[in-house]
Amino acid sequence: MNFRNPPFRYSTLVLLVLAVLGGSLTFISSSRAQQPKQAQPKRAEQPKRTDQPKEFTAEQIAESVIIIAGSGAGRAMLAQIRKNGLERGRETRTGADGRAEEIRYELRFVHGDKPDKDKVRIDSKTPQAEYSLVYGEGRLFGIINGATFTPRADTAADFIARQAHSIDALLRYKENESKLTSAGKDKQQGIDLYVIDLVDKANRKTRYFISAKTFRVLSLEYEEARPGSTTPVKYTKRFYDYRLAQGTQLPYRTVLLEDGKQTVETRILTVQYGIKMEDSVFQNPEAAASSSGP
């Protein structure tokens, strides 16, 4: 695929989306224009009414996001290219005391037919320690120095939220059997937005803010109470620096805010899709050792 002229190609994609959303209206209008005009009896003059723009459904908006994310090929491209992958990057976490800590990470994943069949592994390296969090076979566990451990409740909650409240959750809404509803329109910093709500099978709700011009997800919001607390925290993820990654659209910078305060900034350094992924990467090392013993 040739991406040497991104502005032209992206304009073509937007036109394709508009055709998907409103192509039928053009057909109807042209058909009516071709019909011979017939004399109509005069009617009492009615007050003029301003035409209202067509309202798109949440599903139409989501499908348009998928088309753009797949550079025009949509779901077929995403399913083929982003079946599995390896992402390397860095996170900057700001603590309650205002101190920032940088973490290097490697994210490996394999998408299953359903979310509970997904396999995800995040290897993190901080100045103090190196550890891994692994989700496989419906279970989350940690690995440090070759030994497994049970992650703390807040660590497990952050891991699950990272997957559940994401752009990927919207791109896979049909596979995940999530429900979509429209939350109307919004305008932020001069940008017109479509707003849609997604509720997954675990009843987790995410609100997405989507550019009405580019059909890219610019931000999302959700509320969750931290483990051990009943007070919900409002989380906001903002997405920047969209680039092409093997023919698919991906934001290379993400900022997470908690009740309006920035706590995490993530920057992708490299990403590879479609690479060979060994099952052992997602296995419990202690379980694997016992099963291979005498």
Image: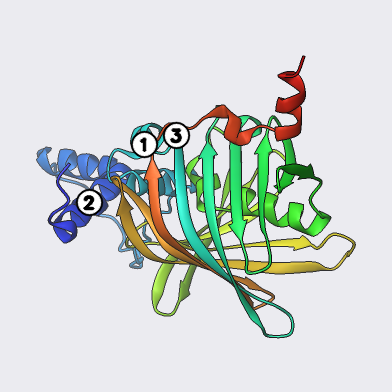
- Cα separation between marks 2 and 3: 27 Å
Amino acid bearing label 2:
Leu
Of tags 1 and 2, the one toward the viewer is 1
In the rendered image, residue 213, in percent from the top left (x then y), is placed at: 32, 62
Look at the image and name its color scheme: rainbow
Most extreme residue toward the top is 294
Of labels 2 and 3, earlier in sequence is 2
Taking 106 as reference, is 191 left or right?
Answer: left
Whether residue 156 can be seen here: yes
Quarter holding the C terminus? top right
Res 83 label: 3
Q: Which mark is residue 15?
A: 2
State yes or no: discs 1 and 3 in contact (Cβ < 8 Å).
Answer: yes
Q: Earlier in the sequence, mark 1 or mark 2?
A: 2
- The residue at the point 77 percent across, 23 percent down is 290
Residue plotted at (50% across, 52% down): 167
Compared to 268, does 150 lie above or below? above
